[in-house]
Image (cartoon, rainbow, N blue to C red):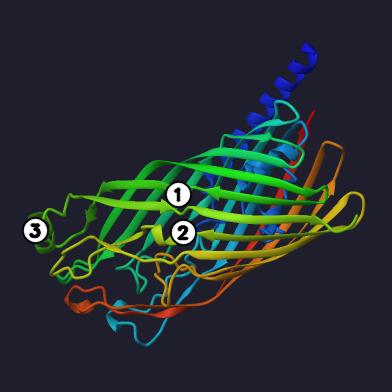
Amino acid sequence: MMTWQLEMGTACRKAVKLVLCTGALAAGQGMAGGLIAYEVGTADVGLASAGYGARAQDASTVLSNPAGMTRLEGTQFLAGGQLLWGNTKFSADTGTSPGLGGDNGGYAVGSNGWFPGGGGFLSYSVSPDLKLGFAVTGNFGAPLSYDNDWVGRYYVQETTLLGISLLPSIAYKVNDKLSLGAGVNAMYGIYTNYVAINNPAPGLGDGRLKMDDRSWGWGLNLGLLYEIDPGTRLGLTWNSQIDLDFKGPAKFSNLGPDLATILRNRGTLDADIKVGINVPQQAMASVFTQVNDRWAVLGSVGWQQWSKFGEVQLGISDTNDPVSLTQNLNFNDTWHVALGAQHRLSEPWLLNFGVAYDSGMQSGDVSPLLPVNSAWRFGVGGEQQLSKTTYWGIAAEYLYGGKLDTQLQTTAPVALGGRGKVVGSYNNTDVIYVAAYYNWKFF
């Protein structure tokens, strides 16, 4: 008995080290995939998130539904990594103010369209009915980087909004059918925003406003897993809202003397900027059913409360009358639906397929600060069992966001210190995800 406990303790310590190392690597790369992404380098990429809260086949359930840990034997660790390429590129129309130039900004997402992600997930068996879990991952936010002289520079040049989550979790099997789980989401938020300022004085070029801060936010993840029969299970999950209260001084550079004087007299030159961002609460219902020895069907329906997001746009609308440095942006709640399947091709190989749809968070025109809206997802992946204790998998997903129109208007013209009119679209927006993961079991 003592030998068994020592072996389990050693295995757990090794797995915890793997989680922290994997999470640290992913966090250092600025991982995320969208605002709230289902893609964190796991099998859910190939399933387009179908069955997200009911699959419970590996340690990534610590994130998707902590109650699912009761289905896992022993101590399990999953490391996942992914790379995405986003085709998010603005195209200006003739309605754009000529004084803004002709630079369309380049690929907005990540570094010239490229962006990494991933995570580490651990499930530890205290007993057959009691499980503990821990994960380090990031599924909230994204970095945007436009060319400094692009036509929308007075609205945004570069912005980073990322949330990196530490997820200690627990699960308990109440009876043969019902399992309950809970986890704390300790999210480390990173926020940076650069925007150009239109100097009314000739010959100075653009000024710049920068705001950056780091903040911790706290949330609660609750999960329920109910096994209707040995081959069918239902998962219900709820994630609370997380408040990231970013606050920092307005950092101006290269301002004309007249504008600097006006801002100083109005108390905004060195004022603190508050950017209260709320990571939305969300709820999801998922189902998994094993049709026969070869096929399983998965599905999900979810809701996210983006109307409480609270993102603001920085900048000065009219440098001759700089009344505010922030502007509120309004968003809509969104709905999510996904359907997928798993096919046992052979004893070592399992294939995943999935399709999903998310409704849009923005009505009509989108902000260049958040060039995202409704989207379709199409996923495919495969897993190979290498031994009783290890398997690996690869997955790919194509996300199609269609055409996103933008129409920004200000009363003051560019020549007199205004932001100007930015009219155009992001044509045929799409994202390609490629993921790989490896799972270990320690008995």
User: How many residues crowd mark 2 within 10 Å: few (<14), some (14–19), many (20+)?
Assistant: some
Residue 165, compared with residue 90, is above or below; it is: above
* Whether residue 41 can be seen here: no
Instruction: Tell me the residue that label 1 is attached to.
Output: 241
Sequence-first disc among 2 and 3: 3
Report how far apart the C-alphas of labels 2 and 1 lie in the structure: 9 Å
Which amino acid, by three-letter code, is at mark 2? Answer: Gln
Residue at 58%, 38% (x, y): give it: 182
Image coords of residue 218 (percent x, y): 44, 40
Residue 244 percent coordinates (x, y): 38, 47
Residue labelled with disc 3: 261
* Residue bearing the label numbered 2: 305
**Foreground disc of the pair 3, 1:** 1
Residue 41, placed above or below residue 217: below
Residue that appears at 69% across and 35% down: 174
Q: Quadrant of the C terminus?
A: top right
Q: Nearer the viewer, residue 126 or 323?
A: 126
Sort mark 3 into few (<14), some (14-19) or many (20+) by Cα contacts within 10 Å.
few
Gap between marks 3 and 1 measured at Cα: 40 Å
Q: Are marks 2 and 1 in contact (CB under 8 Å)?
A: yes
What amino acid does circle 3 point to? Thr
- Upstream in sequence: badge 2 or badge 1: 1
Residue 339 picture quarter: bottom right
User: Which residue type carries mark 1?
Assistant: Gln
The image quadrant of residue 324 is bottom left
Q: Nearer the viewer, residue 96 or 314?
A: 314
Percent across and percent down for residue 290 are 83, 55
Task: Write the residue at 54% across / 52% down.
Answer: 32
Q: What kind of element bears circle 1?
A: loop
* Residue contact between numbered discs 2 and 3, judged by CB atoms under 8 Å: no
